[in-house]
Image (tube, rainbow, N blue to C red):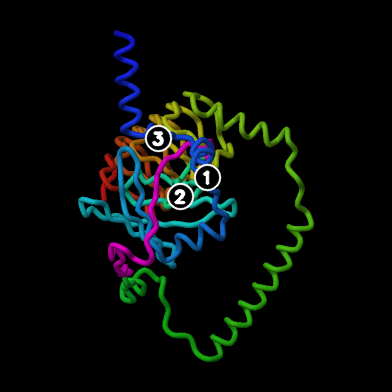
């Protein structure tokens, strides 16, 4: 029985080639190289990548504007942004696909195609490169035009300035630029290196915040922290910096987030029931399917936030 099972497994492996999920093993078997930042940029900018994984596939066209246009085999479409990091990672974030997470992968050329790997060398996608907009997925974005009439009513618009006023404004702008230049020089002269102890403390706090219901984390720096599924119900996060943090499906029920910076935070499916978000900055945040039932959003900034499927926010 065991012998039969072994040969059955061997047959399956032979037919499927037993593809490895580790890029180091794959490179050792078939050769290949890790692409440099310049190579990644040349490969992606203005071109299309067909990404394939065990549960998804999509054609992504990387427009030179920094926007990425996606289309899958079922002709579903999505749009997002892309870039190449200084370390050579290909980064992209779609509006709704892949939970709107920011994804960054290193790229390896292996034989005729490419492999996208995470920091641990695990292969997340196989990719085929096509020149240009292979699927004609690009479309122009129409910007919403501002109403001059409404701006006048709100006091935000003023009649056209005279030549003398424009000259005075230009002079004032030049003075402001000089002042900012001076401030920048002063800042650079007073910079200091963060000690290893401070750095370790910051990582420790971010690690603790993953499971800390009721904790006092007021004015804590949690920027870009990985807090996916974190348990922070009833926590005091007043004035904390959580911009670009990953809070997908996090439990923040009853948490105090007054005046917190949650700009461009990634928190689809988060539980924010009865949370205090007075004056919080949620600009550009991914709030898809988040629950704000009973939450206090007085004075909160929701500009450009993604609110598809959100609960508890009257729009």
3D distance between C-alphas at marks 3 and 2: 14 Å
- The residue positioned 32% from the left and 47% from the top of the image is 97
Asked whether, in this view, residue 77 is left or right of residue 132, the answer is left
Q: Secondary structure at mark 3?
A: loop
Identify residue for label 2: 111
Q: Which residue is rendered at x = 55% and y = 42% of the image?
A: 223
Residue 144, given in percent of the width and then of the height, sits at: 31, 69
How dense is the environment of label 2, judged by Cα within 10 Å: few (below 14), some, or many (20 and up)?
few
Residue stretch rendered in magenta on the structure: 119-143
Q: Which residue is mark 3?
A: 19
- Tell me the distance, in whole angstroms, between the alpha carbons under discs 1 and 2: 7 Å
Please state the horizontal and vertical placement of residue 243, each as a whole percent of the image. Answer: 50, 46
| Front in this rendered view, residue 148 or 30 | 30
Of mark 3 and mark 1, the one earlier in the sequence is: 3
Asked whether the residues under the numbered discs 1 and 2 touch, taking CB atoms below 8 Å apart as contact, a structural biologist would say yes
Count of numbered marks: 3
Q: Nearer the viewer, mark 3 or mark 1?
A: 1
Look at the numbered disc 1 and give the secondary structure of its residue: loop
């Amino acid at each position: 029985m065991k012998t039969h099972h072994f040969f059955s497994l061997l047959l399956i492996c032979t037919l499927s080639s037993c593809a490895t999920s580790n890029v180091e093993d794959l490179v050792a078997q078939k050769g290949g190289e890790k692409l440099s930042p310049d190579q990644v940029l040349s490969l992606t900018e203005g071109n299309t990548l067909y990404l394939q994984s065990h549960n998804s596939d999509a054609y992504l066209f990387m427009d030179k504007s920094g926007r990425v246009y996606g289309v899958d085999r079922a002709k579903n479409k999505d749009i997002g942004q892309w870039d190449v990091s200084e370390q050579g990672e290909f980064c992209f974030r779609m509006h709704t696909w892949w939970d709107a997470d920011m994804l960054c992968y290193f790229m390896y050329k292996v034989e005729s195609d490419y492999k996208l790997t995470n920091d641990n060398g695990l292969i997340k996608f196989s990719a085929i490169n096509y020149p240009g907009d292979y699927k004609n997925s690009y479309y122009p974005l129409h910007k919403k035009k501002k109403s001059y009439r409404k701006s006048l009513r709100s006091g935000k618009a003023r009649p056209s300035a005279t030549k003398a006023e424009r000259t005075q404004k230009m002079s004032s702008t030049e003075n402001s630029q000089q002042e900012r230049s001076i401030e920048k020089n002063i800042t650079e002269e007073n910079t200091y290196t963060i000690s290893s102890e401070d750095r370790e403390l910051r990582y420790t706090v971010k690690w603790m915040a993953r499971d800390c219901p009721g904790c006092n984390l007021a004015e804590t720096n949690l920027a870009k922290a990985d807090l996916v599924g974190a348990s922070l119900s009833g926590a005091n996060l007043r004035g904390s910096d959580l911009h670009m943090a990953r809070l997908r499906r996090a439990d923040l029920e009853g948490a105090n987030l007054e005046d917190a910076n949650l700009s461009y935070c990634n928190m689809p499916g988060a539980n924010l029931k009865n949370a205090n978000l007075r004056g919080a900055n949620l600009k550009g945040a991914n709030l898809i399917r988040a629950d704000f039932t009973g939450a206090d959003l007085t004075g909160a900034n929701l500009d450009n936030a993604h609110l598809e499927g959100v609960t508890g926010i009257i729009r």
